[in-house]
Amino acid sequence: MTGKVLTEKRKPLFRRVWQNRALYLMLMIPLTVLILFRYVPMYGIQIAFKDYMPSDRISESPWVGLRFISRFISNYKFLTIMKNTLVLGAYGIATFPCALLLALSVHYLTSSVFRKLVQTISYLPHFITTVVMCSIILQMFDARTGLFNAIMQLFGVPARNYMGIESAFKHIYVWTNVWQGVGYSSIIYIASLRGVSSELHEAALIDGATLVQRIRHVDIPSLLPTVCVLLIMSCGSLLSVGYEKVYLLQNSMNLNASEVINTYVYKQGLTSTLPQYSSATAIGLFVAIVNLILLATVNGVTGRLSGSSLW
């Protein structure tokens, strides 16, 4: 077998590529998409450092350095926008145990029919589009006809316009995200649980371990590398709170709690009377750099503490 591998390595590169041309052809499709939509647009990043106008070429625009990033940091809205972004991002990351708990619950269900039913029901909300989801949320929390207010009135709580309450926005946003994504997020945990050695559980049962003790001392340590990797990736997108849902749930009453970096960039670059492409690009680049620093920092800390990291 070793001799065959060595013989393959001695063949010319072109011949090896030609022999595996079907695989390389399949690779070309995602590689082309990646280059066209991820790397080619990087040419436009330079407008973050230029006073770009659509009527001029990027190369002809005057260089302004870090003017737009400095303007964003010195903006009176900066602290509010950063606080909202960090609160929504950190709050969302803090809900990761929900998917883990669901995975553990599903894993230990004895009825296979009931297990499949629970998995199907929990997966379905993930496939609801953002626009439809926001429409459901607005109807659910409507002050006059909303289901949530109808339920609260049964307990003597008067109806309120919860979408207009600043303190309620983060809870509505995060927990509707949990409802929509907890089932889909649990898939990787369920797959990891199935890979846990049955011998460990048999040894724990022989020692008289209860179900809770088996979960604590067998399942959770086995899931720890997966949890660490997912947490690192989540922290790497802490400032990239999706603008679609936030933007669709925004109104004039909750704006102080719902304005995040991505919605601010969207308004700066596309919906303002005079679109500021350079400013929007500069802010987007600032967010990408901060996310990269956070990713590297959390990866290093997690690697030292648990031994599990991305690199």
Image (spheres, rainbow, N blue to C red):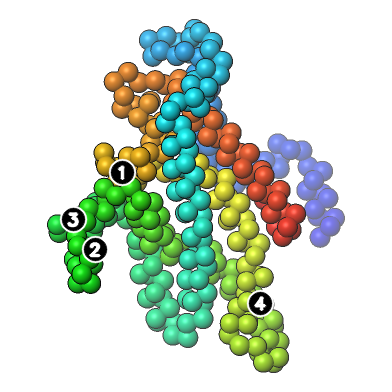
Which mark lies nearer to you, 2 or 1?
Answer: 1
Q: Quarter-wise, where is residue 220 in the image? A: bottom right
Residue 126, can we see it? no
Name the quarter where the N terminus is drawn. Answer: bottom right
Nearest to the observer: residue 28 or residue 249: 249
Position in image of residue 108 (x %, y %): 51, 81
Disc 3 element: loop
Position in image of residue 117 (x %, y %): 37, 76
Disc 2 element: helix
User: Label 3 belongs to which residue?
Assistant: 143
Specify which label sits upstream in the sequence, 2 or 1. 2
Residue type pointed to by label 1: Asn
Residue type pointed to by label 3: Ala
Residue type pointed to by label 4: Val
Question: In the rendering, which numbered label is found on residue 218?
Answer: 4
- The residue located at (60%, 78%) in the rendering is 215
Q: CA distance from mark 4 to mark 1?
A: 45 Å
